[in-house]
Image (cartoon, rainbow, N blue to C red):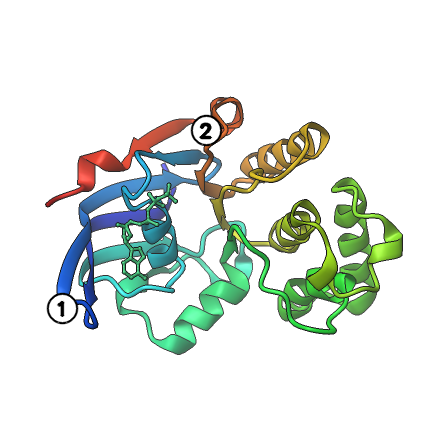
Amino acid sequence: MNAMIQVQDLNKAFTLHNQSHTRINVLSDVSFQVEAGECVALTGASGAGKSTLMRTIYGNYKAQSGAIWVSQGAVNPHHGDGKVNLVEASPRTLIELRRHTIGYVSQFLRVIPRVPTLDIVMEPLREQGYREEVARRKAQTILELLNIPDTLWHLAPGTFSGGEQQRVNIARCFVADYAILLLDEPTASLDAENRKNVLYLMREAKAAGKALLGIFHDESIRDEIADRQLNMAAFSSP
Ligand SMILES: Nc1ncnc2c1ncn2[C@@H]1O[C@H](COP(=O)(O)OP(=O)(O)OP(=O)(O)O)[C@@H](O)[C@H]1O
């Protein structure tokens, strides 16, 4: 067993300061782990805390208590085999983890004006130390696989369709050597052929020993790729 993510007794609440300081407990004593080569699907009703859990693991939100142990693991020799508790990690460690260990496909691509698609996809590879030609080749290969026409590679994706932007997001995450992939609805606005291509990428990632944690509202995709489901209803509290 090689747990890449190990969540222990994680608690996350939001306090709405501009609304009478109302406190919403979203995650209560969440514990689970994801092994290398495994895909775990988060399920549960809308508002159950699936995205909040993902964002907390990516370090966007700070948990009140508990631990998120992340193994930099065998996939990424850059970091060795050490484990880091993300809840207590410094900003510098968090940046390192995002550069080398954890990839995140959010539902929306955060577009930086004027940066061409090819550069957006090459960027994580550059940060991981790949030579320019290798990074370019890898980026081109994955953009082709995801059916982004080469006429678009030199354009910034701000004007792209929702599905095209989502595929750029997916390309950027799957092209790099992350040991852990957090996937928030990666196939939500894709057509059948591109859903298949993303399934292929997810299978390849599992075969390479990566750990996948995902939200898949599409049940057929979930059934195809997930080894286990984690129902967030088990961790909600009033
Ligand atoms: N930044 C925030 N500030 C305050 N409350 C938040 C914040 N983010 C999420 N919440 C609240 O936390 C709860 C869980 O939201 P979350 O988006 O994690 O649910 P979800 O299970 O991903 O839902 P969905 O399936 O609809 O996307 C909701 O009640 C939401 O209002």
Q: Residue at x 84, y 64 (%)?
A: 154
**In this picture, residue 106 sits left or right of residue 164:** left
Q: Nearer the viewer, mark 1 or mark 2?
A: 1
Could you tell whether 11 is left or right of 214 in the image? left
Residue 230, picture quadrant: top left
Crowd rating for badge 2 (residues with CA inside 10 Å; few <14, some 14–19, many 20+): many
Q: Residue at x 10, y 45 (%)?
A: 238
Q: Position of residue 17 (x, y in %)?
A: 19, 72
Residue at coordinates 47% horizontally, 46% vertically from top-left? 184
Where residue 22 appears, as percent x and y from the top left, is: 14, 62
Where 50 falls versus 196 (above or below)?
below
Residue 233 falls left or right of residue 73: left
Q: Quadrant of the N terminus?
A: top left
- Residue at 38%, 56% in the rendered image: 55
* Distance Cα–Cα, label 1 vs label 2: 38 Å
Say if residue 10 shows up in the picture. no
Dot 1 crowding, Cα within 10 Å, few <14, some 14–19, many 20+: few
The secondary element bearing badge 1 is classed as loop
Q: Nearer the viewer, residue 96 or 81?
A: 96
**Amino acid type shown at disc 1:** His
Which numbered circle lies on residue 21?
1
Which secondary structure, mark 2? Answer: loop
Question: In the rendering, which numbered label is found on residue 226?
Answer: 2
**Mark identifier at residue 203:** none
In the image, is 176 to the left or to the right of 185? right
The answer to which of 130 and 171 lies nearer the viewer is 171
Residue 189 lies, in percent from the top left, at: 60, 40
Q: Quadrant of residue 58?
A: bottom left
226 over 55 or under it: above or below: above
